[in-house]
Amino acid sequence: MEQKKVVLITGATRGIGRNTALFFAEKGYKVIGTGRDSERLKEVKEELDTYSSEHVMVSMDVTQPTEIQDVVDSVMKQFGQIDVWINNAGAFKAIGPTWEVRKSDWINDVTTNLFGTFHCIQAVVPIMISQGFGSIINVVGGGTIGAFKYGNGYGTSKTAVARLTENLSEELDETPIKVFALDPGLNDTDMTRYQRDTKDGQRYLSDIEGLFEQKIDVPPFQAPQYAYYMANGELDHYTGRVVSVYDRLETLKEHASSSEQDSYKLRLNK
């Protein structure tokens, strides 16, 4: 019998992370989900148990390298491999003019989104190099490929993650490891509800509500499905690139081996 693959998903207690954990469990993966909310960890574990009892939900703060390393060591001891690592944990609290937002919120957004991804990469890449396989999927988002007015901390950090993805892919070019940036599209999550329901969100990000009214948002399974395509090798030509759930899979496959791949990278238009 073929051995089940192992996926670790950060920020798996809610939203896109939770949906991705359940999607991969349904597809037969062994899922390790991480988060900081102990009650939500228990709730998602119960949901995962409907597929199999082998899944694990564990407390981990992506801003704390020692916690990440402890989890990696535990996963390797229990499962012996990490096939896929999805950097999904994110924060978006700094809403408003850059000179007016709370410094602590802006710094927390960047620390979680960018430095959290960096810490996880440092912990898992040596494992993947040693085992000779693996995929890393970095979730990006609003502001990655264009300006994000009044969402500067989030947009800046996610743009940096996209560039980090391309640079890391180049560094790993002589290995079998693939690194992707996934734009999950507009999802109805706690994060987007915070943007729509809070005073600052309603004042500065009112356009988001309009996008939901226009039904620009995507179904809960769409981002997990694209992560699954990446994990299973269907989009290997896009390593180092930003793939959006609004990109049709057929179009992506048509462009896979052409120079049009450059349109999926961060580039200045001059």
Image (cartoon, helix red, strand yellow):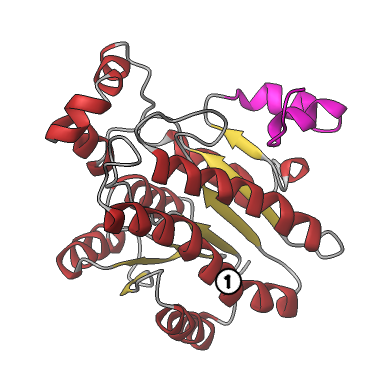
The quadrant where residue 267 appears: top right
Coordinates of residue 184 in the picture (x, y in percent):
46, 37
- Outermost residue, top direction? 214
42 inside magenta stretch: no
Residue assigned mark 1:
82
Query: Front-most of 33 and 179?
Result: 179
Q: Is residue 183 above or below residue 240?
A: above
The answer to which image quadrant residue 58 occupies is bottom left
Q: Position of residue 75 (x, y in %)?
A: 48, 80
Q: Is residue 259 magenta?
A: yes
> x%, y% of residue 99?
33, 42
Q: Is residue 233 above or below residue 36?
A: above
The answer to whether residue 211 is left or right of residue 193 is: right
- Say what secondary structure mark 1 lies in: loop
Q: Nearer the viewer, residue 212 or 149?
A: 149
- Quadrant into which the C terminus falls: top right
21 or 69: nearer the viewer: 69
Q: Is residue 202 visible?
A: yes
| Type of amino acid at the residue the image marks with label 1 | Ile
Where is residue 60 shown, x and y percent of the image? 35, 73
Q: What stretch of residues is rendered in magenta?
A: 247-270
In this orientation, which residue lies closer to the viewer: 255 or 123? 123
Residue density around tag 1, few if under 14, some if 14–19, many if 20 or more, within 10 Å: many
Residue 43 as seen in the image, left or right of residue 97: left
Q: Vertically, is 76 above or below 194?
A: below
Looking at the image, can residue 29 be seen? no
Q: Residue at x 35, y 46 (%)?
A: 19
